[in-house]
Image (cartoon, grey):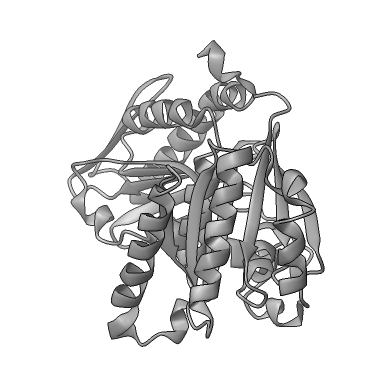
Amino acid sequence: MAGSRRKLLLMGRSGSGKSSMRSIIFSNYSAFDTRRLGATIDVEHSHLRFLGNMTLNLWDCGGQDAYMDHYFSTQRDNIFRMVEALIFVFDVESKELRKDIETFVLCLRNLYEFSPSAKIFALVHKMDLVILEKRQDVYRALMKSLEDTSAMFSFQVQGFATTIWDESLYKAWSSIVCSLIPNVAMFQKHLQTFADISEADEVILFEKTTFLVISHVTNPRSPGFRSDSTRFEKISNIIKQYKQSCSKLRAQFQSLSIRGSDSTSYLDTMTSNTMIMVIMSHKPDSRGSTDLLGSNEINGDGDESLADDAENNIILANIKIARKMFEKIETMNPDDR
């Protein structure tokens, strides 16, 4: 994966929210901070390091009609060649939705010519402006049209309903970026091994800067953890806001542990580019775990604080031992697996 580059086109009507979501995900803006952003002029290029050796070459294309005309005429070879993914943003309250779909079709037509293997993503954005009871119907109606249109050019479109005001943006961008990571299956495999050895209920691997979810594992014997399908993205949102608060206080965020009534969560650095969260449920009768160095069991009859310290030390030891393997996966060529 050394030196790999991924060209992403971010397109859509002017004012649809493209630059706002880019700034929230990649530049640590809060949703409130985006109000000071101006319109994108022509194409803004961002070279974003992701997982160390992978670079996301993000082309944020201004959505004014004058710029759009150039994209599909004099600039189309430059814009649409060697594209890994198109992220097209639809403003759900657009007064010219038909024209937006026509622009989407032009994008597909040019990608079919210049980048036929590109992945297609549609973000139906600003969903917070739609009445809650109608959101699913509005989203499904638009996606049905986009799916039919994409099929005409032999593309499959993956859609997301998003807003800058909740975790939906993180869910969408985590899926988009993970689709571009060639070694994501290796991350998943070794994260499963880590979870099994640690006897964890859930383990999540985050990219360190954006806090997008790279991979996660859930113990099937812990059904309670699956009750919220957006829990990972909520964690991303919360932790990123916490990191912003630390920065404002000129403090550096490194690790975190939170003890709840039925579980304890540990968040620590896995590699220079990733962080790992390990969630351990509390056992009423005994507290046991097996680390990578051997077996270590704590009985419920002992001091609870000693049990907590022991579990904490085991998790940290497991992370330390696993670190070298995860660092290797980041730099591994997918052909070497």
Looking at the rendered image, the quarter that the N terminus falls into is top right
Residue at point 57%, 56% (across, down): 87
- Tell me the residue at 51%/25% (across/down): 322
Does residue 321 appear to the left or right of 155 in the view shown? right
Looking at the image, residue 252 lies above or below residue 31? above
Compared with 116, 87 (above or below) is: below
Rendered position, 52 above or below 85: above
Where is residue 264 shown, x and y percent of the image? Answer: 38, 53
Q: Is residue 52 left or right of residue 41?
A: left
Classify residue 89 by image quadrant: bottom right
Name the residue rendered at 72%, 50% in the picture.
76
Q: Is residue 241 visible?
A: yes
Q: Nearer the viewer, residue 309 or 35?
A: 35
Image spot of residue 125 (x, y percent):
50, 72
* Residue 4 in which image quadrant: top right
Note whether 196 is above or below 301 in the view shown. Answer: above
The answer, for residue 259, to whether it is visible in the render is no
**How far across and how far down the image is residue 132, in percent?**
33, 84
Q: Residue at x 55, y 27 (%)?
A: 326
Which residue occupies the extreme front position in the image? 73
User: How many numbered marks, from 0 up?
Assistant: 0
Q: Nearer the viewer, residue 107 or 32?
A: 107
